[in-house]
Each structure stands twice: as C-alpha cells, then as structure tokens.
Image: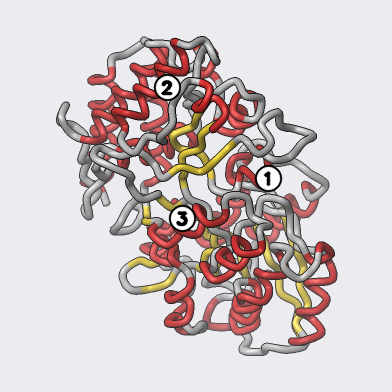
C-alpha cells in the first residue's frame, strides 16, 4: 500500500495500466457508460477499481468475488496522475472506473461539480457515521461524496529518549512549552536541529501549516472560503511566523528548505537526527520508526497530543477515501465493493488481526474506530491507545468542506511559505500573497 506522502513519486509496474486507463477516459463517449445508462447488476459483472495504492492480497479479492459474483480489475496509479484521469473522464462525461479515489482535499471539487454519486443512496450512512470519525471530511451539503478507507490524521511525534536526556520529565502541552523544550534539547547538544519541518515547495508544507494553525487555535478559511489568517495576531499568521522563525533560529535544519515530508521522516526522525515533528502522519511508528531495517529509533518514538495555544489540541484529518464516479458502469456493484472494503471484518483482515496472509501493506491504519481500538488492545499497533483517542476527535481541515479551488490554494500556500523560508520574501508578504489567491478564488466561485 502506498501513502499520500509519496504522491508525486510513486512508480511501479502499473504504468501501462495507467496509460491504458487514461486513453479510455479520454476516448469518445461511445466507449463509456453515462449515469443514465448504468447497469443495476450486482453479480456476474467485472468492475474497475482505480486507487493510488497496490491492491490487497489476491486471496482477499478472490473471497469478495466468491461471495458476491463481482470480479475486480485493480488499476493502480500514482496520486497526481489519478486526479488528472478522474477530472478528464468527468469533464468528458466518459467512463473511467466504477470505484476510484476521493481524497479529502478534492471533496469540494468532486461534490460541488456533481462528479460522484451521493453514497447515502447506496450505503447505510448511519452505521458508517457511528464508527468512522473522519466521514465528515467526505461529506458536503449533506451528501457523502466518498468513504474513508484508511484513517490518516496529522499527529505530533516525539523522540522520548532525546526529551528524557534533555531532562524533560513532562511532555509539553502548549506550543510555548514545546518550543522551549526543543530549544533545551538543542542547547544541551543532543541534536543540532531538533525540529523537523518540511519546507520544500510541496503539499506536505501546506498540511504542516494547517495543523500548526490549528495548534495556535484557528482555521485557515471560513465557510465562504475567505482567509482567516491575514491579521498579524491571527493563528494562521502566528503559525507561519513560528515555522519560519524555527528555521532561522536553528531549531530546523537549514537543509530542510528542500526537504519534503517523507524525506524528513526518513532521514531525520527515523535516524534520530530530529527530536520531534509537530505535524507528522498517524501510523508512522508502525510503518517506519519501528522498522529495524530503516530506522535507528525503534521503540523511541511516541505520538503526542499536538501542543496548542493553551493546551493539547485535536488533530486534523487527511484520509484517503473511495467513491463512485457518476459515469460508473456498475454503481450498485461498486457500492457492494465499497461496503465490503470498509467493513469491520475486511479492515480487521487488512490490519493483520486475522492472520498475516490477509494484511494490506505496512502503513494501513483502519478508518473504523472499533478496529483501531481492537488493534490497540492486541498490542499490534504501536502506541495504539494514543492513536485511537486522537481518531475519536480528528476533525476536517476545512469544517465546511474543501473549496473546489483547493489545489490552487495549496499551491499558493506552499510556494509562498517556501519563499518566506528562503528569505526571498517576508512572512507578511507571503501571507498577503496566499490571502490574495484565496480572495480571488472565493470571489470567482
């Protein structure tokens, strides 16, 4: 299973499949099926599932086919290319896949443009809501655009050994104490640059700023898409200033100006060269930091409730989801697949609770709270109790749904914050430039 941290660099033997799918998506309408011509068949059909991940074990898919009579053609693609294919097919009103990716950041675009079928008409929305805290990130205007199949949220990670060696006996609960503790670690010479912030101009920098803004007690955009960070006293402004100051003051390595999120995790946190990442990804202890072949900090990293302005704050969600494109050939069969894929029993299989032969990748953390709690109780999910508690209160980055113009906004965020970090523009100018893009896009939407 691949992860969002490697969206732009995911490569594999699925390239030919991806090219073939794009050709299908951009072909004439005669090759596709519109919503009005979709089949209601739920057995004896073959559906195409297109996700930015490797497929589950063949045994899992074979069992699904045996139980339902629905065959699955799995089409993997890197995340960025997949978004292009989804948009191309929807714009041309042509068939692309029966089930495909619905990323949290694209819910506004996909929902407001009616490119995906509302899932509350196909699935038991009530039962999903009770066990999927992150379903709200996929709901827009009362309609469920997608269903999260994993749980991913921004968490703070700390190297407990480095904190202990610095004489820190109580973990920080506020951003002020957190900053002070990192400075203490630096001053004692334990590591030269204790804080990991990925300042490369990429999506990881945007999400880091969102979580830091949340830590300072605010949100990025209001319900109308208007910026909430222009005032120097606003949480978003303070977050940007704190991040840039951390680089200038030496808490963050100078080289991080060109380091993205996955690189920082692998070369700094996993190697014991950083003491903490304020906005890291849930599940990384299991999938990276406790993996002996790639890490020097096995059993030394812990999840920490993100330090906030006056105490611990909640975590922002950035999960992956799946939905049914409006042009799907077999929407009813697609719904059965989604229902199976996100069921508690299947997620238990994927996460290893029922044997290693059914495990789906090393980084999978279930979207169902009940399964995460089972994993925590079994001891197979590192620091699982903290993860389960954080999942319960995880909230959307944009409470009213991501705007349709999110990609443009994120590009403005990471481009200008990167420029502020390099010193080519001030934090004030970077904030003004980001706000200008939000104002323009909100005014045009």
The label shown at residue 287 is 1
Residue occupied by mark 3: 104
Q: How many callouts does the rendering have?
A: 3
Q: Residue at x 56, y 57 (%)?
A: 86
The label shown at residue 320 is none
Position of residue 205 measured from the top left corner of the image (x, y, whole percent): 45, 32
Q: Which residue is drawn at 40% across and 56% down?
A: 394
Q: Residue at x 60, y 33 (%)?
A: 262
Q: Earlier in the sequence, mark 1 or mark 2?
A: 2
Q: Which of 375 and 315 is in front in this view?
A: 375
Position of residue 92 measured from the top left corner of the image (x, y, whole percent): 54, 61
Location of residue 443 with respect to 201 vertically, above or below: below
Q: Nearer the viewer, residue 425 or 287?
A: 287
Residue occupied by mark 2: 182
Q: Image quadrant of residue 338?
A: bottom right
Instruction: State how far apart marks 1 and 2 are (Cα).
Output: 25 Å
């Amino acid at each position: 299973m691949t992860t969002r941290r490697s969206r732009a660099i995911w490569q594999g033997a699925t390239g030919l499949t991806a090219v073939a799918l794009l050709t299908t998506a951009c072909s004439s309408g005669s090759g596709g099926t519109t919503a009005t011509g979709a089949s209601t068949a739920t057995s004896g059909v073959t559906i195409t599932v297109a996700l930015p991940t490797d497929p589950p074990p063949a045994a899992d898919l074979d069992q699904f086919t045996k139980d339902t009579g629905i065959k699955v053609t799995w089409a993997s693609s890197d995340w960025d290319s997949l978004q292009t294919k989804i948009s191309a097919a929807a714009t041309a009103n042509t068939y692309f896949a029966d089930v495909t990716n619905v990323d949290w950041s694209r819910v506004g675009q996909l929902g407001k443009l009616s490119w995906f079928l509302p899932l509350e008409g196909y699935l038991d929305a009530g039962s999903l809501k009770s066990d999927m805290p992150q379903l709200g990130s996929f709901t827009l205007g009362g309609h469920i655009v997608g269903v999260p199949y994993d749980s991913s949220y921004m968490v703070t990670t700390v190297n407990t050994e480095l904190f202990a060696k610095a004489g820190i006996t109580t973990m920080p609960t506020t951003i002020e104490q957190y900053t002070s503790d990192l400075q203490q670690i630096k001053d004692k010479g334990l590591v030269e640059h204790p804080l990991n912030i990925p300042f490369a101009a990429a999506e990881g920098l945007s999400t880091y700023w969102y979580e830091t803004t949340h830590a300072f007690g605010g949100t990025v955009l209001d319900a109308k898409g208007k910026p909430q960070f222009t005032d120097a006293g606003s949480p978003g402004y303070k977050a940007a200033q704190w991040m840039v100051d951390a680089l200038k003051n030496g808490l963050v390595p100078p080289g991080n100006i060109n380091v993205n999120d996955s690189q920082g995790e692998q070369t700094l946190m996993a190697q014991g060269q950083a003491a903490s990442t304020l906005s890291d990804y849930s599940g990384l202890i299991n999938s990276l930091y406790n993996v002996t072949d790639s890490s020097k900090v096995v059993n030394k990293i812990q999840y920490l409730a993100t330090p906030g302005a006056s105490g611990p704050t909640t975590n922002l969600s950035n999960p992956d989801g799946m939905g049914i494109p409006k042009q799907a050939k077999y929407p009813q069969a697609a719904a059965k697949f989604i229902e199976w894929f996100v069921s508690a029993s299947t997620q238990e299989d994927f996460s290893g609770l029922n044997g290693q032969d059914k495990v789906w990748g090393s980084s999978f953390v279930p979207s169902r709270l009940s399964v995460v709690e089972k994993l925590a109780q079994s001891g197979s999910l590192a620091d699982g109790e903290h993860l389960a508690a954080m999942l319960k209160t995880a909230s959307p980055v944009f409470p009213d749904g991501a705007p349709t113009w999110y990609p443009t906004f994120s590009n403005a965020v990471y481009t200008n914050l990167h420029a502020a970090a390099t010193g080519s523009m001030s934090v004030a100018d970077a904030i003004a430039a980001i706000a200008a893009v939000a104002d323009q896009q909100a005014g045009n939407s």
